[in-house]
Amino acid sequence: MFELDATELARIQFALNMSFHILFPAVSIGLAWALLFFRVQYTRGRSEAWEFAYYFWVKVFALTFALGVVSGVTMSFQFGTNWPGFIERAGNITGPLLGYEVLTAFFIEATFLGIMLFGKNRVSNGVHLLAAALVAIGTTMSAFWILSLNSWMQTPQGHEIVDGKFYALDWHAIIFNPSFPYRLAHMLVASLLTTAFLLAGTSASRILRNVHGPGTERVLRTGVLLAAVLAPLQVLLGDLHGLNTLEHQPAKIAAIEGIWETQAGAPLTLFGIPDEDAGRTRFAVEIPRAASLILTHSGDGVLQGLEDFPQHPPVLPVFVSFRVMVGIGVVMLLVGWWCAFYVVRGRALPRAALRALALLTFAGWAAVLAGWYVTEIGRQPWIVYGELAVADVVADHSAGVMRGTLLAYALLYAALLAAYVATLRHLSAKPAASLQMRAPTPSLAGGG
Amino acid sequence: MAEEVLPLVFMAVMGLSLLLYVILDGYDLGIGMLLPFASSAEKDVMIAAIGPFWDANETWLVLGVGVLLIAFPAAHGLVLSSLYLPVTTMLIGLILRGVSFDFRVKAEVRQKRLWNRAFAAGSLIAALAQGWMLGSYVTGLETQPINIAFAALIALTLPALYLVLGAGWLLVKTEGALFDRAVVWGRKAVLPMGLALLAISIATPLVSATIRAKWFSLPNFIGLMPIPLATTVAFVAVVAVLQRVSSARPAYAWLVLAGTILMCVLAAIGLAYSLYPYVVLDRLTVWEAAAATSSLTFVLVGLVIVLPFTLAYTVFVYRVFRGKATALGYGSPE
């Protein structure tokens, strides 16, 4: 740590904040829609079970949302504190996109969440339903703008650069830049999958501990079916996203696949340890021609190797993160289908399946983080791909200041993450009767 | 034309957002700082009094900083990298405060005390850091000893203002013993707040020659007199009400909150006059720091469409949750 310069420390600090932050939107985007579904189900039949499910999960949502808000506020400041050059040069593009997020998403979510949490005796069911719908739309709008901005940084277009500064020429082209539809779809499904396993895993552990209530079974079934449908869809979306990346950021694909030399009929490396100094992958387990087949849809297709890209991302973290993401995705797919086999037939899940689901409660998090590392580390050394380098926009704080604040953030985040997981476990270990389903007292339901 | 006007429009939106933030999250943070002085049951009522609102309140800060980023990218980098340490400190405070809302009621019971403390500490840290930032910003982000002293003065002042706002909010949202306690808290905090306001009014022109020149030249000085006069009237009213209200005689208790809000508004007008046309005093004018007109126009469209809705549903939520808070949160209105 003592050899790192201020740029690397700023990068680590920002990566830490991003990593911490994304955990919570990854849950809250999907969970907001799940809550709306629970509320709609309750409205249709007025069944206790769905109301129980709603009030149990709205507590989790409130906690998740609060952590997302505080870490998101931190990020809105860190653009300026860590990357002042980025805002000064690209502010004409980034500012409006971030601004639209605040305007169209933040206020709606923050305001109507209050009604979801405290509105029980104050508003009609119709208004409550509307509030749940607005919160779900708000979280999704938030993702829309942030992913538009992130995608523009990956595949910039619709601007011109005058004297080193970016100027917008065509907002439609900027917002709907080439990688945006793929990234947005991939992330929204990732969030729903993360939520599906959180719902199913938490419900499974409640059943295993015999503290489940009337809604637990229904939430479990909802989670399992969601997972079984979305996991294969995510594979498809991931593939399309990869093809898009090959077109616009071939260096990232070369790092993902560990392709060193430009070649026809490139093999797919399943496992291995890339060695950037030696320019090869050690202990590689390969399938001949498969990479060319997947990426060019021809076994003899030519793929560019890292040798063609003097400025390419660090290979090892991108290569490993990609395999972690895909590996977890495959496990999620298999477990999802296994459990759905029982759910579709209306049979109770065997204990082994419940245990598997409980183990995978937070699996979505690991996959989401790994996926973001692939795409963000894969963007290096650029902050705006091909146009603006990270090293040119960093703030000139001393390494000592950066080290101190990094340590403070790291300690705080570790403590909060531990508290979040412990609290979720605590909530899910409580017997249903003690959760006060009929009259969820708002002060017990928490503050938002 | 657009190049002239748009930066001013965004400066106004930014100022308004930050003013709303100070008033709205000010009472949240004030109540957070008062938390350690209340009994366990009272703590729950105090939190219930701000529970439905705090999240949206904090969002005004995000909009304020967002507008700084959107409209004045050059200033955004300069301000936030100059204020790196206080900003980081404030963020850690806001994080602690924000998460404690939920953890204190959802975590295991034995952890509740810990999260109550984190709530109070986070509120205090955020208030102190915001004061420092304000003080440093008002005098142009300079780092001379006199500027540091001024920043320290405001760092100690802003919490006093927040305490009065917090006590004022409790007078509106609570009754009985907690109401009486809030009156006592208000009485204790209001004098330091008044002294601090006075000190700032004297110190600001001393520290900054630019501001001195703007205020103490005729006829400006006479034209500006309504601001300090109205502030004095509001202050006297707040003190007078605090002296006579109690839970048995709660008439006009809302004047404490209203009077303090009025002081905030007047201070903001004074500050806006002092700083204009700078976004960073003596360094960057709003026009020098402004983003490209095409970017500002694009955001303005959204702002004009969305902001009225935002204000409307904010009012709607305040209406939904009107009336007194209880330990069990919000029952039916009346």
Image (spheres, coloured by chain):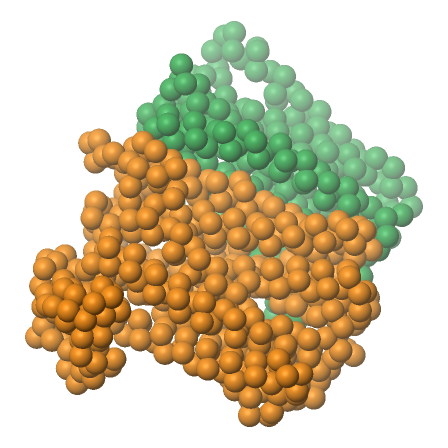
**Camera-side residue of A175 and B276:** A175
Left-right relation of B176 to B224: right
Question: Quick one: quadrant of the C terminus of chain A?
Answer: bottom right
Instruction: Classify B163 as above or below B112.
Output: above
Question: Which residue is farthest top?
Answer: B219
- Residue A436 is drawn in which quadrant? bottom right
**Camera-side residue of A230 and A280:** A230
Where is residue A90 drawn, in percent x and y?
A: 30, 40
Residue A296 appears anywhere in the view: yes
Question: Which residue is farthest right?
Answer: B248
Residue B183 appears anywhere in the view: no
Where is residue A347 drawn, in percent x and y?
A: 66, 87
Q: How many marks?
A: 0
Left-right relation of B16 to B44: left
What residue is rendered at 29% in x and 60% in y? Answer: A243
Left-right relation of A435 to A272: right
- Which chain did the renderer colour orange? A
What residue is rendered at 17% in x and 85% in y? Answer: A283
Where is residue B163 drawn, in percent x and y?
A: 65, 46
What residue is rendered at 57% in x and 10% in y? Answer: B222
What residue is rendered at 67% in x and 54% in y? Answer: A132
- Which chain did the renderer colour green? B
Question: Quick one: quadrant of the N terminus of chain A?
Answer: bottom left
Where is residue A189 drawn, in percent x and y?
A: 48, 63
